[in-house]
Amino acid sequence: MDSHKNSFSSAWQWLFGDPVRAFGVVSLLLLVSLAIAPAKNYFSEWRHYQNQYLQMIRGRGEAVTLQRHFQGGIQQIWLPELGVVDRCTTCHVGQNEASLADVATQPFRRHPVIPHRLDQYGCVMCHRGQGPATSVEEAHRSTLAWEQPILPARYMESSCGQCHRNALAGTPQLNLGRHLLSRYGCVHCHTVKLPDGTAMRPTDDPPSLEHIADKTTREWIYAWLKDPQAYAVTATMPNFKLSDENARDISAFLIADSTSLPGDTAPVAASKTPPDATAGPTLYGQSFCASCHAVQNAAGNIVGGDVGPELTRVGNKVKPEWLQVWLRNPRIYDAGTAMPHYRFDDRQVSVLTGFLQNKTDSDLLANVHLEPATPEQIVHGKTLVTEYGCASCHEINGIKKPENFAPELTRLGSKPITQLIFLPGMAHTLPDYIGAKIRNPRSFGAALKMPQFTFSPSQVDSLTTALLSLTDRAQSLPPALTVPAPPVSNYQPAGKAGQVMADLACFSCHAINGRGGDMAPELTWEGSAVQRQWLEDFLKNPNTLRPALIRRMPKFNLADSEIKELTDYIMTVYQTPAFDRDSMLPGGYPPALVEQGKQLFYSKYGCQSCHIVDSKADKGYVGPTLTQVGSRLNAAWIYNWMKNPQALRPGTTEPNRGMNDEDARALTAFLMMQKTTGKQEVKK
Amino acid sequence: MRRFLLAVLSFSLAMAGSGCARKSAGAEPKAAAFGSALVESSGGKQIGAVGAVLAQPLVVQVNDDHGSAVPGVLVEFTGPAGLSFDPVRAVSDSSGQVTTNVALGSMAGRYELTASTFNKAQKAVDLKLVEIALGYQQQLGQQLNEKYCARCHDPESTPERVSNYDNLEVKPHPFTEGDTLNKISDADLTAIISHGGAALNKSVLMPPYGFTLSKSEMQALISYIRLVSDPPYQASGMVYSGR
């Protein structure tokens, strides 16, 4: 102890005994402490990376150019109106160097081509992370002070969605995610308010359960509630994982609660002659039911459209009397259905009913044996229906649609991680949390009400992307910096024709004035395009224009008066202001002009690669067949279409050829000669 | 200075410590048999967005000397940085197949991955596979391809889209045909797309898209074509110094 004390005091003596030496020592200590800050700066990470970058470019051919572009020191992108202060470019030096395409090591990779300039938007707008940080750890990962880590590349499109409310061509994942939020009815329960003040709207159409007892049996409801996907693989109804008792009680309540709708189970006169076995499939095919309804084939593949419900096991579900009335006129049971009112006669209705009733799966209801419902079960069923929020999606007699049934998701993309409860073993990031919630909601607690959906991994990623785009920033951006979604069109055609169009559910497939589906051609200017006689014939008996298409216009068996009504309306109202439909080409179609058009068609423009004029020689199956185009389209339409197809139908596949007036006139003459009757033989 | 050094030291220690702690203690699958060859069953040459999990899982089959499947063989998947597998190691099932889900890295490009196992003589048996990741630009190109090009340039038909390839007198080049397309420069490709086949003494059946597609759309299309071509496209004009 003493020796320690002695050596310490001798060292003290040696250092500070002499006043001059003491001064020197203190000065030295001061100098060293003053050097700490510059040293820290000198050894900083970003300086290290900048030196590495300079070393890297030294060996390259374009070193002089790169050297000239390089700026040392801390770089910063400051955008006050976006709230962006980004120093990322301090280390990510080669962002804009096109010649660094081969460099694969970070932080020197060139930024991939995007439609925005980095200095106008900064980095954290898209990538998240902490912009002002100048160390790798702080900028990229979540720390105690900063919990917003870098967004993984797979969710990158979510950032586009902060400003772009419309569907961008470059963000398929985001578009799909937004579509799924509406299509799977997420927004029935979860409110998602958009920055413009409106709320996201569901696009599924869950059936009303007010008259469900007319349509189906309690046994089917029970089986469906237990596992909707066992009935139809494509069913969008989620699985609520109900116990046997709960499913029993809910089915009891729904049947007991159902009222009878007058007229929806009227018996149809039985046909006198039993239909042959092929009549059903033939009529199903002719009516193009498969354009909207899918069926699972023997190989397990889903074949058909997804507008209507899957029909693989429909015979297990619907009662024959109800199905007959539904097929005769679906609007009696559901006025707003997407299903058209086919004008089937009694024979056709019974043929189709028979065909659909045979689509059964003997296993589906084999093990469902329900005792008659007791009043207690019905009361308990009602409680369950309220608890599970069934009325958020379905209309149910005596139960009001609950408000704010599930947490609002308007700002989910900015939710602080400290407010989330993670499962053990799960990565503590927002995307992982959202993904896990969608994949398996009940894993966060057995008592949670959110049901189990059946999404593929890529669908989960898409949904996560769409939800991550709902950030604080998206809500607070100045309107000038956002791209709004196209306004929702409530276009409704007027008058009697409008009623017929609603009855036929034309908008399920065709779009007019911004409203409607995209399965079939857009019809906004149809009146300018086609000839009256052709339209009448087509509505009477639709023959396809594109032989390669599976989904086609069905035959609705319209009455002559309805056809006249529709034709009149379309020919009068759906007219483009761009040109006069009846304007004829000056000079008609002299043979020389027709011949010139033919030459242009085959030799200059190579139209035969996609279109057929001569059904013997031409093979193009991409565009519509043109063998009778002279009886179908107006000359003025063809002429203007030649000059700029996209001007008449935005987004059409036919390329704009930049055609001059003379060529367009000759081609129009040639095409107008392709008529139904007295058609001249075209030889190449 | 000493304090600073101390801080550095303790920081690096802490980093090393946390690095050690991250090693998983999960049960590793064990090999019960050995195969002598790996063959791809499905899931190679898929195209996906950067960072995304590929739509189809990757399935490889383990065969013995006679070409019949061997169950119980341990197969490991490795790939360049960014590529991840779930699971990384797996034992072949009763039909001799190993299935893994592949998540692409965050950079667009071709990812060459390797499935490997050991044969009886403890020699490594490898199978090289390629998956393709599309960045923003290539995805845009892919969509344009679907809309404007694939009907003729893709000989494969799907129920939704019947190919027009067989109907054409002059056959278009499929975009995977690297032997031909890699020799055409970006400028020439742009010229063919915008002015059509006739302008470059090629088939008149290829229409011009110069009035329909913007310049950036054509660039997107070309970057997509370059990425899917097989053999892979090597950009020309990259200059390196001798060292």
Image: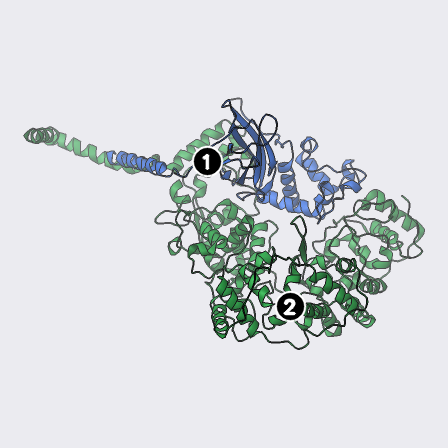
Chain colours: A green, B blue
Helix, strand or loop under label 2: loop
Could you tell whether B40 is left or right of A280 in the image? left
State whether discs 1 and 2 lie on one chain. Answer: no
Residue A530 visible (yes or no) = yes
Number of residues whose C-alpha sits closer than 10 Å to that of mark 2, classed few (under 14), some (14–19) or many (20 or more): few
Q: Amino acid at mark 1?
A: Pro
Residue B81 image position (x, y, % from top left): 49, 35
Chain where mark 1 sits: B
Rendered position, A426 above or below A357 = above
Question: How far apart are labels 1 and 2 at the CA level?
Answer: 59 Å
Q: What number is the disc on residue B29?
A: 1
Q: Amino acid at mark 2?
A: Asn
Q: What number is the disc on residue A490?
A: 2
Residue A145 image position (x, y, % from top left): 35, 49
* Residue most extreme to the left: A2
Rendered position, B193 above or below A193 = above
Could you tell whether B171 is left or right of A104 in the image? right
Residue name at image x 74 percent, y 71 percent? A500
Q: Nearer the viewer, residue A63 or A193?
A: A193
Quarter where residue A283 is shown? bottom right
Residue B109 image position (x, y, % from top left): 57, 37
Q: Nearer the viewer, residue A32 or A194?
A: A194
